[in-house]
Image: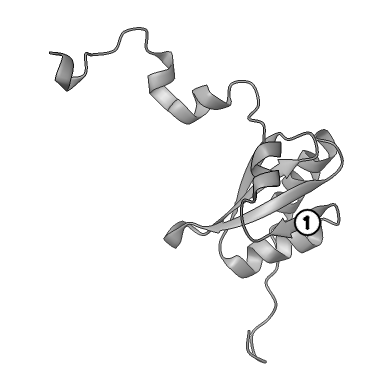
């Protein structure tokens, strides 16, 4: 950041969503900031109870400002062994991540089984 640049202003809606997540999942959370290219930065949250959540920010400066705006969220640089072991996907997480495939009852045979 140069002297002429203003500090990043976090989105109030995103800050409110992170606060709500923290309140619903044990009162604290750990945030992992993951740049996703042109889309921005994914803020992956792991609540005190292990439940996963996420939010997006436009850039890394905004993501760091969002984390700093919520006192019960600590930032970590990477997914360590302890954090990975603590993370527990919530009910329905696999179905949401699988999208349309999760609602299928019949699957085609694999190419090597035809």
Q: Secondary structure at mark 1?
A: strand
Colour scheme of the picture: one colour
On-image quarter of the N terminus: bottom right
Q: Residue 62 in the image: state x and y as whole percent.
A: 65, 65
Q: Residues within 10 Å of mark 1 (few under 14, many from 20)?
A: some
For image coordinates 47% across by 57% down, the residue present is: 36
Q: Quadrant of residue 46?
A: top right
Rendering coords of residue 4 (x, y %): 65, 90
Task: Name the spot of residue 44 as percent of width and height, x first.
Answer: 63, 48
Q: Residue sitting at 81 percent across and 34 percent down?
A: 24
Give the number of callouts. Answer: 1
47, 81: nearer the viewer: 81
Q: Nearer the viewer, residue 6 or 2?
A: 2
Q: Which residue lies under the disc numbered 1? A: 74
Q: Residue furthest top?
A: 105
Q: Quadrant of residue 74?
A: bottom right
Tell which residue pokes out farthest to the left in this image.
Answer: 114
In this rendering, would 27 be left or right of 10? right
Q: 40 or 78, which is in the foreground?
A: 78
Which image quarter is the C terminus in? top left
């Amino acid at each position: 950041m140069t002297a002429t640049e203003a500090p990043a202003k976090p989105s109030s809606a995103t800050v409110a969503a992170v606060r709500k997540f923290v309140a619903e999942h044990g009162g604290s959370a750990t945030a992992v900031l993951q740049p996703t290219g042109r889309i921005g930065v994914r803020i992956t949250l792991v609540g005190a109870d292990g439940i996963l959540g996420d939010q997006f920010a436009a850039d890394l400066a905004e993501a760091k400002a969002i984390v700093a705006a919520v006192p019960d969220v600590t930032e970590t640089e990477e997914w360590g062994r302890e954090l990975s072991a603590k993370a527990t996907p919530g009910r329905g997480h696999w179905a949401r991540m699988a999208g349309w495939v999760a609602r299928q009852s019949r699957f085609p045979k694999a190419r090597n089984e035809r």
